[in-house]
Image (cartoon, rainbow, N blue to C red):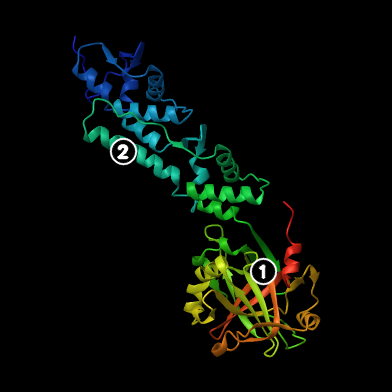
Amino acid sequence: MSLKLTSTGRLPPEQMFTLQVGSKLFQVSGYSLNSDSPNLFTHFFSANESSTLFIDRSPQVFKLIVHHLQGYTVEIQDGAQFTTCFLDAIYFQLPRLQDLLKHSEYYFVCVGGTHFKLPKTLVSQVGNSLNYFEMACKSLFDDVQAIYHTMNLVRPPPQSPPYVNRSPNYFANLVTLLQGGILELTPERRQSLIQECRYYRFLRLEQQLVACQLRWNPVLQTQEIVMAMNDIRPKFVSLSQSPSPVEPVPKKPRLSSDSCWTSVQYRRPFVDADAPFARELIFQVMNSEATLYFIKNSKTIHVALSGPSLNMFRSIFNKLLSQNGIDLNNYLKQGSLLVLPACLSLCSLQVNSVPCRNVGALVEDFQLVDQVLDFNNPNHINQLVPGLKLNLMKSLWKLGMRDEKLLMIAIKAEAISGLKEYNKTLEYV
């Protein structure tokens, strides 16, 4: 007896249909088979008198398919189950199930052998999206469907579930942070998690992990941000709209500045996107890559940057300085030093582990008897003049600009005066 379709071309909803999937027999109503049609089932039963459809597929996966056809939510446990279910949704020509899986609320991934069910809402913020999993899943869907349809295959090609050869412990930490949890992180683990964020393209979370201090300066009445120089992104540095004083009431003009300088500001990408203003930037120079030079005759101070710190400084600030008429090439000396005018008027300074009361006292204590390069004389750069050289072990700075000139404003620094003091900083292994 031939099967009679309804007037709408659908199977009779009250009739039960038999399907043999692998070694298991299923009885499914026409109502269920019609729920995601047209599909392989409706095509077969509308064209064949046979009451049984034989299918050489997994009965375990087909149980999920039946749950979907009966109107239940398909509960996926892991990436392997998700992938096989999607492949069978293609094979059985179930358009609604394919769409539901594509737009699932979760990413099902295996990271380093551990399965994760990652809610998409956790990584949907600007900066965390478009991420690794969005791109990987889109590629999975598009590639499998394209191959199956264009090559006219008998069944979908085999497909491995998404696998990421990364640390599952680090990924679990990232999930905890995305969920709003707080972790006690060592500097090494923080840096490792930042690397993981970059791999997965969780760029917003990366910025949340970057070590920084957000402070309100009650004296200057301004917001400040303290960051390591290697964590600063050049695109997000800017210039303050109003100048700020380097020293409100200078007591001595010597080795200080009483001018107002416009400070460089910073707005962290993604994290500070909605903030009404940028913060004044205080940046930390890498250890032992900055040197202070006090020149006696001109009563001036310079800071010389070298190595990676020189390259970082140029990459971060060069575009902003150029836009304000400042060419950093004019501050290059001897090819390997970037020598910038500096102000230490308000710097909390330690020299040889001893707090320095003020710059004037430092000059008097050391008497400026060393011979240092005369950076004030461009015609005789190799000429030595009386002065003082201090190697900075740690230092925090602001960068100021005024009238196409720039000034390094020291905030806090620890310095040593020679090799003997440096040797004191060494630890036994």
Q: In this rendering, is residue 21 above or below 136? A: above
Quadrant of the image occupied by residue 382: bottom right
The image shows residue 10 at horizontal and vertical percentages of 25, 23
* Helix, strand or loop at mark 2: helix
The image shows residue 184 at horizontal and vertical percentages of 68, 46
Q: Is residue 41 left or right of residue 134?
A: left
The image shows residue 110 at horizontal and vertical percentages of 48, 34
Observer able to see residue 221: no
Per the image, the residue denoted by label 1 is 396
Per the image, the residue denoted by label 2 is 143
* Helix, strand or loop at mark 1: strand
Observer able to see residue 299: yes
Q: Is residue 329 left or right of residue 141?
A: right
Quarter of the image with the N terminus is: top left
Q: In this rendering, is residue 420 above or below 149? A: below
Amino acid, disc 1 = Leu
Q: Residue visible at 47% across and 27% down?
A: 75
The image shows residue 49 at horizontal and vertical percentages of 20, 12
Amino acid, disc 2 = Asp
Q: Is residue 273 left or right of residue 23?
A: right
Q: Of callouts 2 and 1, which one flags the residue occurring earlier in the amino acid sequence? A: 2
Query: Badge 1 local density, few (<14 within 10 Å), some, or many (20+)?
Result: many
From this viewpoint, which residue is outermost toward the top? 1
